[in-house]
Amino acid sequence: MSQPTRRSVLKTGALFACCGMAHMRLARAQMVEGGALSVTEIADGVFAFAGIPAMMLARNQGRICNLGFIVGSDAVAVIDSGGSVAEGKELIAAIRAMTDKPIRYLINTHMHPDHIFGNAAFAATGATVVGHHNLPRALEARGEFYLKSYRDSMGSALMADVRIVPPTQLVTGEQELDLGGRKLKLIAWKPAHTDNDLTVLDEQSETFFTGDLCFLGHLPTMDGSLRGWIAQLDTLKAIKAKRAVPGHGPVPAQWPQGLEPEERYFDVLARDIRKAIADGVPIAKAVKTAAQSEQGNWQLFTEYNERNATAAFAELEWE
Amino acid sequence: MTLRSTFRRNGVAAVVLLTMLGATVSLGAQAQSAGGPEPATWNSLKSDVFGQKTIEPADGIISIEAPKRAEDAAIVPVDLHFKTDAATGRLKAVTLIVDENPSPVAAVFQFGKDAGVTHLATRLRVNAYSYVRAIAETEDGKLHMTATYVKASGGCSAPAVKNPDEAQATLGQMKLRVFPSNAPGTESMTRATEMQLMIRHPNNSGLQMDQVTRYYIPPHFIQGLTISQGNRLIMSMEGGISISEDPNFRFEFNAKPDEDVKVDASDTKGKKFQDEWPIQSSTL
Ligand SMILES: [Zn+2]
């Protein structure tokens, strides 16, 4: 596959490895000024940005989840747009530093703001927004709330450009996208992390973009169905891939080993909550102790564990 | 008593008006003790709910517990404890309010004459940093208020239904749990028994717009609920959209052995749900 020579300019590390620290610092400064996300080419024509493990704030411009793009011989597909229009624009700049090919698809892996708040940045690119068939409904129910609540944490200046842009091309079951001799396999999952999880497999390089069906480092968050997530782990593991880009965590990740930490966490959480329910412990008390043994294994544990336990309790109570 | 709800869009709080009450209000300084700011919303809301009626401090008659931070905005557990005496008379009703929600009155509970309800726990949606308050009406007609301040959840937690397809598929299913009493030797006719009633229902806010029709999807929630044992009313509820999906009520009351517990519920689409459970004295 032919690539413009400038594609290597932003390849983190590769070009500057021989040039010493001074050049690297200079290069990083230029990247920030130039407004391009620092992406890594993890396979031929497959680029990924690693988000930072944090809450979405004004100072990080919502850059907390992993994003990526795949370059085919005709066109580019983008996987998630980032947590702000500012981040979305930086992603476009990173794409344009690699290729002039049209951005044909913007694939949203699910409804969460860190993955979709950058959608509006892609309006001018003409990209078709692709998502799970449940994504429009989920955004109808939450969009206004997301816009309002993130004004508090990210600030009104950063939020001014953010729009809820629902997908127009919907995926039920499986769907293939063609970038010109390069096929992407999209899978719409049953409720797990959310009720609108979509994954992207680049068949050529066997790179698997998991969306938030895989969390590494960053504690998984529960906004769909814990039972559904656990039940689909085996199907997820069976996806044949050489590497994965998890929704959160180091890029690239080993596959399917990257699923092991969250599988362990889910088991502990479900076990603790089921015991509390059986013992008649009220929800408010049960969520304080559930899965505490996992605390040392995760970033953002205190931010999200109690919420996960609350959602899990309300779900598992119906078993 | 009737409960009318009006949804005012564009960020203005909608108000549920209760026609059961009227009269003057004294602004309770008690709310500030709950660790939150000046309750500005409540100051404008209270006369819509309670007219000009005086509202006194809770004074131990009612107490409220909720997490300081709403971890999951869609499911915020709230616990109410009641303690009445001969002077105040029994508790007639409790109104549960989330000041900053689009429809602040979450529920109005009425208690049966000899139900002896001493504890009631449920789950609420909390959309924003808000006071959650409970106002009890005692038999002498007085109102007593307690409040606690709940910070909205951070991150991507929204007060929305997580799994709407499953909610539709299981709509109206009910589950009743009876928790064994650990009070040996108490008079079986009057001892408190703890039960938990769960109802499958999306309890949908309806505040989202249908992208095709551009109309707001009508709200769909449990409107009325009656829990009785034998011919006795334990409690009834008139509810709104601030009650979480799959409405859940855990309560202690004076159960009588060998009388069935019966639940009747209805939602805003006119659907009726009913279930009944035999209560053996051995389970109490
Ligand atoms: Zn997510």
Image: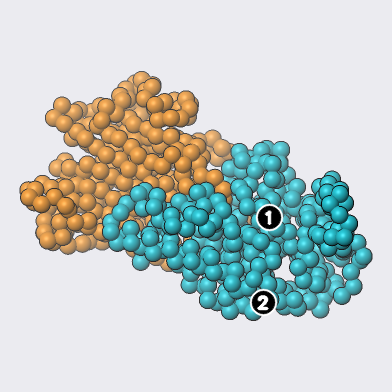
Chain B drawn colour: orange
Chain A drawn colour: cyan
Residue B60: x %, y % from top left: 25, 30
Determine which residue is flagged by label 2. Answer: A241
Quadrant holding the C terminus of chain A: bottom left
Q: Are marks 2 and 1 on the same chain?
A: yes
Residue A18: x %, y % from top left: 87, 60
Residue at 60 percent across and 74 percent down: it is: A256
Does the rendering let one see residue A56? yes
Report if the beta carbon of the residue with label 2 is closer than 8 angstroms to ligand 1. Answer: no
Residue at 39 percent across and 52 percent down: it is: A289
Q: Is residue B42 left or right of residue A155?
A: left
Depth order, front residue of A91/A133: A91
Q: The residue under label 2 is which amino acid type?
A: Ala
Q: Is residue A220 above or below residue B47?
A: below
Q: Is residue B256 above or below residue A151?
A: below
Number of on-image labels: 2
Determine which residue is flagged by label 1. Answer: A51
